[in-house]
Image (cartoon, rainbow, N blue to C red):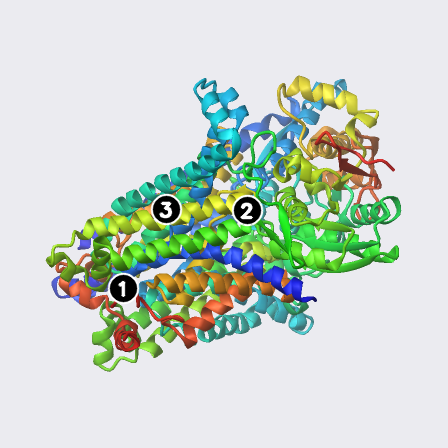
Amino acid sequence: MENTATANKPINGPKAATRKKWLLYAALAAVLIIVPVVFQAATGLGFLVRILVVVGIWVLLALGLNIVVGYAGLLDLGYIAFYAMGAYAGVLLGQSVSDVLGGATYWAMLVPAAIAGAVTGLALGFPVLRLRGDYLAIVTLGFGEIVRICLNNNIFGLTNGANGLPQGSDQLIPPFGAIWLQDNVRFETPIGQFVFSQNLFWYFIVVALCIGAIIIIKRLDDSRLGRAWVAMRENEVAAAACGVNIMTQKLWAFSLGALSGGVAGITFAYVQQFISPESFTFMESVFVVCIIVLGGMGSIPGVIVGALLIRGIPDLIQGLAVAGVLKLPGEAISMITGYRFLVFGLLMVVMMAVRPQGFIPSSRRARELNPDDDGILADEDQSLWDLEHREQSSAHNP
Amino acid sequence: MTSKRRRFVALVSVVAALALVVTGCGAKTDGGSTDGGSTKATEVVIGIGAPLSDGAVALGQGMVRGTNLAVKQANESQELKDLGLTITTVEGDDKGDPTTGGNVATQFTSNPNLVGVMGHLNSGVTRVAVKIYNQGNVVQVSPANTAVDLTQMGMANYFRVCATDDVQGPAAADFAFKTAGKKVAFVVDDATVYGTGLADEWAKQFEANGGKVAGREKTTDKDTDFKALVTLIKSSGAEIVYYGGIYNSAALLSKQMKEGGVKVPLMGGDGIYDPEYIKLAGAANATGDYCSSIGLPIDMLPNGQDFQAAFEAAYPGEAIAAYDAYSYDAANTIIKAIVAVAKDMGADKLTTTDGKKAIIAAVAKTDFEGVSGQVSFDAKGDTNNKAITIYQVGADGKWAPAAK
Amino acid sequence: MSLSYLLEQTLNGITLGGLYALVALGYTLVYGILLMINFAHSELFMLGGYVGLGVLKLLSDPAVAEATGLGFLEPIQTFFLSGTFGFVMLIAVTFAVSAVVVGILGMFIERFAYRPLRHAPRLAPLISAIGVSIFLQNAVLLWIDSKQLPYTRADGSAFVQAQTAFNVGGVEVSTMQIFIIATSLILLALLDTFVSKTRIGRAMRATSQDREAAGLMGVDINSVIALAFFIGPALGAIAGVFNGMYYGSVKFNMGFIPGIKSFTAAVIGGIGNLRGAMLGGFLLGIVESLASGFVSNAYRDVIAFIVLILVLIFRPGGLLGEAVAEKV
């Protein structure tokens, strides 16, 4: 989209384009605010706000992984590990300081959670990022499993194993204002009583985090770093030859993605008020990858729509059916849950064959994925690793 | 290019409009049922929170069966008709997943006519859901949560009709040490909430009795390879192996033990009290293995026969699963509280905040003869019914109460 | 801990390693030729277990003959259930059918999921393979059974009474363990000879070195790739049947962890290198078994994955180097 906008400017004049842009943003903002408020007010539909919160956290996760997969072209199959690190680090640290910080704990813990994610990303990335892409997929997968198993086995006596955190009667303190708003902002509307619930509060926090992430990512995309990522993704060897430090660029992408995962993790922990290893399985990692692949690698609108479709729609249909808005037999709901992954799997295969750029592609990425000339592609696909090791492995041979 | 923009704006507005329409419909249907409240029968809702499409679906379906049976009987009773009250149920599929469970709980509490929840199966789901019910003043009665610390969360609206790990584990340990005369044990669990909790309690009591725990290991609930573990057990000289977990892995452990020359019985909790256990392990390998289960065998209870007859009439051809009877009792707990409050305050007050709080208070005072035994709660919300039965696989390849 | 304990755990490890090695051969063969991780290979291993169970039930479970009402099954079952010859034939037929069926499925997957992507960037076939893997797992879950199925006849009797242990100097060895280790060694030897000595084998090596050049020299690239996608899954299926017989059950998600471990084994040995895959398999099996016997059963998977990361950091080409067998 940003490309088309720049292409437009000379034709429409900069003023008209800017005005349209602001109109668009205003419309989006109105929808983002009005829809959840209406849901919250309507009798029996307040739960939709919570579904939106969960979807929002997944948007944040997908935006983070999109930096790694979409921008830097590195397949990470253990992304959920950073999400878990953020959640556990934030909760453990938060519990030890919550007596002092009270309602500020969540805000304060955003920083250590982000750092926990980023540091884990760096620690894992440093040794393994020099490997070629498909090794990376397996190593990150293994790492995701390592993290989950360690959490599940109560490593160092910290994580409380499968029982999860917080333990017993401990509580995670909701951020400032959440309780006050819930207790004081309530009034009757024609469609039911409006209460400024904690879910609505979290909705606005999550939306703010997503918007923040989108702004940062867009700025990054236009920066030196973003251009280096494009170069690296398109042709690693040529980029290296032009002076792009491949390792540094990959580390940046990996740790920025991990950082975003950490922020999503701590937010998830505070929304749900409980975390346990079962929320951080390999299937969750696959979920995020599905969102990105189906939505469109490297495309921000694609990722958002992907998260809405994959994470939101099944829950939404089920919820509306239970609320009696949608009339569906019970078997239909079981079918949706049961066949969900089968369909995702099939979609991934079909998409790769017919539309590898995703439902809402980034225009740049689409051109890369459908090149005109195979020869160029073969060159582009070569990694530094191959070049460096070709010599070595032939040296091994007699 | 501008048309692209315009299309996007249009799309956004359509989404917004759609959301409003959906909301409008929802509000209308809800309004319709409450408007006529004063003249027609008052309708209150009990939510059933259970895994219905993912996770332990077989157990979840049993929870729905048990609850619906109790509600059907209640609606047919003269008592409810006199009060002008009908009870309906709504199913919330938690998929055994805490996040989905949180969605279900939010949905339940956003239904103004919902006054109680019968559920959930998984302790992790309850941990998330119970706080949401607490905020909405909705009572939760679980038929199946056995994690000890759930009633230590300080949630006044939470009750359960099943005995916890710290009742079941020690009872089984006492049996192993005193009745079966085993002095050395090897304790394994599957690193789940259920398995670890049970195995820890068992090991604690076994050692307190003077027994020796020769080894403590963890596997996962998906593992099938126990060869290395079996070799370790063999070298430990254990006389009994305790496995905290469900039947899948337990059966394979028992099978691989017997094949690997460890001819000692395996003991487990109610998670392995299932005919599938014997099928998977092979009858020859499973013979002599023990398990504990909560409550007394159904046919030894006074109300057991009636329940079985009613169940067969309502669900011909279906078998009673582990939690059908407990769900029946849990649902009856809520129904009896609803009736008590309706008599006290009037049926139309049930769905008010005061009414919901009164229901919680009434559940705390529950005392009736259920299918699983006497149903009553202590101050924390745990059941006072702490009967445990030990079963053993007999030579005929079936679970039967073990000889004392 | 005595010496016999150490030996027994090592033997457990070698048996497990034999299974890893068989699966790892499939990964390494495909990687050597196409430079792609066939992520769906673990699901083919799982399907091998299911097909084997089906064949065994059909050929030797009287309850199945009764339930299906297929009259012609009875004389066939009588043959397979009578005497040593019948038993050997039963085992041979089971392995053969399972290998062929899954091998053909492997070719099918290559044809429809991977071949269209042969000229796409490397990430595309990998994602497609993950899709196939998810699809196959859920297909079995939905259309066969979500439950764990026992690897026995309906009456609970084992198909192969080879678990009986005998004592060799204080170490318990079961015939099943010997069977698994011997089979995996023999199959590797056969495959190694096939690749290094035959004409088709030479074509495979040529394709793995330079696909285009091999094509220009008259090698039918598509057949070579299809062949790799037959042999690999067929070996995986054999491992799947062994896995069912040895551990006693099959389940739709049983392939995931062994699949990752087998890939680890292939990487440890040097991916693309057949002997390396074998060595890696046995090493990983032993490491895992000793880890679970001496350190902690709970962390066995963690230790296996740490080994993978360490090997990749310090010796990214694997212990035997990459693709020595192919790149002469």
3 and 1 marks on the same chain = yes
CA distance for labels 2 and 1:
33 Å
Instruction: Tell me the crowding category of disc 2: few under 14, some 14 to 19, or many 20 or more residues within 10 angstroms, Cα based.
Output: many
Pointer 3 residue: C234
Subunit under mark 2: C
Pointer 2 residue: C246
Q: Amino acid at mark 1?
A: Glu
- Above or below, A345 against B209 in this view is above
Q: Image quadrant of residue A76?
A: bottom left
On the image, the x and y values in percent for residue C157 come to 60, 34
Which of disc 1 and disc 2 is earlier in sequence? 2
On the image, the x and y values in percent for residue C13 come to 55, 59
- Above or below, A326 against A64 in this view is above
Which of disc 3 and disc 2 is earlier in sequence? 3
Element carrying mark 2: helix
Pointer 1 residue: C326
- Left/right placement of residue C1 relative to residue A342 reads right
Subunit under mark 1: C
- Check if mark 3's residue and mark 1's residue have beta carbons within 8 Å: no
- Left/right placement of residue B361 relative to residue B7 reads right
Element carrying mark 3: helix
Residue A107 visible somewhere in the drawing: yes
Tell me the quarter of the image containing the N terminus of chain B: bottom left
